[in-house]
Amino acid sequence: MESIKTCSFPRAGFLGNPSDGYFGKTLSFAFSEYRVELTLTESAKMRFVPGEVDDAMFDSPENLVRDIRLYGYYGGIRMLKAVAKLFFEYCFDRGIQLPRRNFTAEYRTNIPRLVGLSGSSAICSAMLKALMKFYGVEIPLEYTPTICLEAEKLELGINCGFQDRVIQMYNGLVFMDFEKPFVEANNFGRYERLDPALLPNIYVAFDPNRAEESGKAHKKVKRLFEEKKPDIVSAMGEFADIAQQGRDALLAGEKEKIPALVNANFDLRDRIFNVAELNRNMVMTARTSGASAKFAGSGGAIVGTYEDEEQFSRLSAALATIGCTTFKPTIAVTDEIAPAVDGSWRNS
């Protein structure tokens, strides 16, 4: 049979994150300037081919140490295996008869690594899309992010929430409500597609040199949340309210309310997380131009709004002085592949 090719895109957590891991609400969009492409080709045995994030060669001892500190000892192959395992278990548990067919899985990615744009979960979501096509299995769309989440969280022990997997399976702009009783009853949240045309002018900026491992900070906050520390529980409620206000403002055509909500989202995060100064500086530098700014994820990339082309030029110039790439994201409404920002693949 022909090869099956799928892709998944990075995402920007626009409002409400990181409350998706704490029964909150988020507003997120996927954009197509970068992507993971994954190919499944029928083969005699099941094979997983190393990709860009399975580095085995290093320029120096310093590079090896830095790479392992940031990315650990495992790369993308573990993501492919974990998703495949849960996909097969999903089918076995439901009596779905699969064709007797094996595959070779290959992926490539140019999503900047560990800057909060969800490159790892993009590998997972692209793999699940490919498996569904390869074996002709339909899984309810609202449940597909759950499989990706469980692959990372339960199988691999990665501390993460629903948001990234939802937007990478749905694409576009999505409002997500993770109300605890609903999630515990269904193992997924309420997902509402919004028209991306409702958004104000938006930008994304990142600096790959600001990559940092965010697991420790998230684990600490998770522990405090589970211990029901009042400030942490209250903050997660505030994050969720910011996302709700953003969703309501967009639907009401009140784009002018969004910049203040973007800024409030970061300011709240800055109060409860130990935000690295290098990453805080990205936000503060962007704000000097008059633009709004917050983390797109856990640091290393920011997202925000700008008023006009003149302000975007000032924003881009200010961020360039601290090594950041700034661009206007193209909202990925389908899985069709658009050109990369620089027109080529880059090993990030």
Image (cartoon, grey):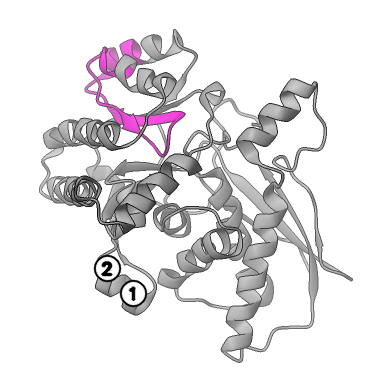
Query: How many residues crowd mark 2 within 10 Å: few (<14), some (14–19), many (20+)?
Result: some
What is the quadrant of residue 22 in the picture?
bottom left
Name the residue carrying label 1: 184
- Boundaries of the magenta span: 286-315
In three-dimensional space, the C-alpha distance between marks 2 and 1, rounded to whole angstroms, equals: 6 Å
Instruction: Please say whether residue 347 is visible from this viewpoint.
Output: no
Q: Where does the C terminus fall, quadrant-wise?
A: top right
Q: Residue furthest bottom?
A: 95
Q: Where does the N terminus fall, quadrant-wise?
A: bottom right
The secondary structure type at the circle numbered 1 is helix
The answer to whether the residue labelled 2 contacts the one labelled 1, judged by CB atoms less than 8 Å apart, is yes
Residue drawn 22% across the image and 30% down it: 263
Residue drawn 19% across the image and 52% down it: 237
The secondary structure type at the circle numbered 2 is helix
Q: Is residue 179 above or below residue 232?
A: below
The location of residue 59, given as percent across then percent down, is: 80, 22
Residue drawn 33% across the image and 74% down it: 184
Instruction: Please say whether residue 327 is visible from this viewpoint.
Output: yes
Name the residue carrying label 2: 180
